[in-house]
Image: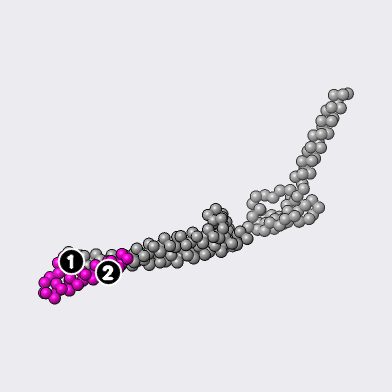
Amino acid sequence: MRKLLVVFAIGVMFAQGVAAQANKSAKVIYRYKNSEGVTVMDSNIPAEFVSKGYEVVSISGKVIEVVPPAPEGDAAKRALHEKQLREQREREDIQLRRSYSNVGDIDAAKQRNLESLRGNISILEANLHSANKRLQDYQSQAAAVERSGRQLPEDLLKSINNLTQEEKDIQLQIQQREQEYSEMSKKFDEDRKRFIEITQ
């Protein structure tokens, strides 16, 4: 008799556990439409219908959450692009916080970097002036040779051509540095504005 009571008690406990688990899993119901467009309410939702959107409903019938359909086609591409932009902005914001403690740090970094770049431009401008002066000297020599009726030496022609190309190369470098200067200044201004937005 005692043995039967123990077995009965264990059976009751097991049944209660199963009932509790069933009650826990049945706390919410998913409402979705199947492939035939029929509304279905179930304790789970098949994977193939998740992307179509569904509602999470309590056992009392109250809508807890509405999950919209996943975007498709162009909408999906736009959603992906927007998501990538948000993630990129989040990474940039994290890097911005790591790089600077306050707005003054950004201003100091801007001044330091722009001064360095301006110094580089000044060196290139000095090189351009030097190349131009040497070219003028060689051109004067060439004009004197031509006036005398002699043929221009090959090395003089080569020097003139080399310096002409050097001038073009330096001018291009100066243009590139000036563009870099403008873009760098703009980037620091944007970082400054964004830093204020995310820290205030």
Residue type at tag 2: Asn
Residue assigned mark 1? 156
Residue assigned mark 2? 132
First-in-chain label (2 vs 1)? 2
* Image quarter of residue 13: top right
Q: Report the front residue among 198 and 114.
A: 114
Residue 75: give x, y in percent of width and height.
59, 62
> Residue at the location (79% across, 37% down)?
17
Can see residue 34?
A: yes
In the picture provided, is 142 more to the left or to the right than 37? left
Give the CA distance from mark 2 to mark 1: 15 Å
Residue 147: give x, y in percent of width and height.
13, 76
Q: Report the front residue among 37 and 184.
A: 184
- Report helix, strand or loop for mark 1: helix
> Residue at the location (75% across, 55% down)?
64
Specify the quadrant that holds the N terminus: top right
> Residue at the location (40% across, 64% down)?
118
In the picture provided, is 170 more to the left or to the right than 1? left
User: Which region of the structure is painted magenta?
Assistant: 126-154
